[in-house]
Image (cartoon, rainbow, N blue to C red):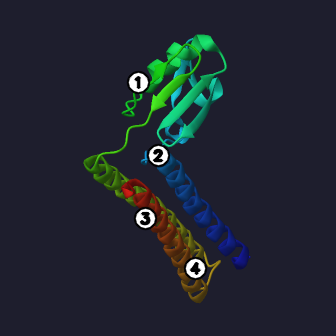
Amino acid sequence: MADEDLQIVLDEAKEAMDKALRSLKAEYQKVRTGRANPQLLDGLQVDYYGAPTPINQLANLTAPDARLIVVSPFDQTAIGDIEKAILAADLGLTPSNDGKVVRIPVPPLTEERRKDLVKQLKKTAEEHKIGVREARRDALAMLKELENDGALGADDRRRAEKSVQDLTDAHTKTIDEMTSTKEEEILQV
């Protein structure tokens, strides 16, 4: 019984920490580096016939070279709405259309902007580390509760706490690695 309970606690903690990693990865994909990347537009909602619709459901997004994103709408009548949505998203990008596609030139980042982006990265990383630590706190509270209920011995609880801490350390290290990789991408000229 105690082993099953321990495994449930560890699985829940791991799932919560993995969720923080997935969220961080999604956030980092939206951060602009020096190269054009269609993922910059992920999560962008276009007002399409009165309904907010994700841009990737309205158009094909490509990056034919390092300084250009091309948005090819499936419905040509939506081209104006797509252009308005990109401008309204305040991404620092200026789209232009030729009636068939929307071209978005991606200007190189200034040194100051690169440093601001690195600060944002570190702030985002810290927020996700807090999520990992909250998962650890919840797991430790569940272990304490199991011990108080008599379903778990003190030695087993300490061993399980060490497992939870090892899991926390591994996830924190992964967040640090992801952050330094993204930081290198941003600072690369």
Residue 90: image quadrant is top left
Q: Are marks 3 and 2 in contact (CB under 8 Å)?
A: no
Q: Residue at x 55, y 30 (%)?
A: 70
Q: Nearer the viewer, residue 56 or 173?
A: 56
**Few, some or many residues within 10 Å of mark 3 (<14, 14–19, 20+):** some
| Residue pointed to by mark 2 | 35
Residue type for callout 4? Ser
Residue mark closest to the camera, 3 vs 2: 2
Q: Which mark is residue 180?
A: 3
Instruction: Say which amino acid is labelled 2.
Output: Arg
Residue 178 coordinates in the image, percent (x, y): 49, 62
Label of residue 163 in the image? 4
Mark 2 secondary-structure assignment: loop
Earlier residue among tags 4 and 1: 1
Q: Earlier in the sequence, mark 4 or mark 3?
A: 4
Disc 1 from disc 2: Cα separation: 19 Å
Question: Which residue is label 1 attached to?
Answer: 87
**Front residue of this view, candidates 111 and 55:** 111
Q: Secondary structure at mark 1?
A: helix
Q: Give the mark toward the camera: 4 or 3.
A: 3
Judge from the rendering whether residue 26 lies leftward or rightward of residue 124; answer left or right.
Answer: right
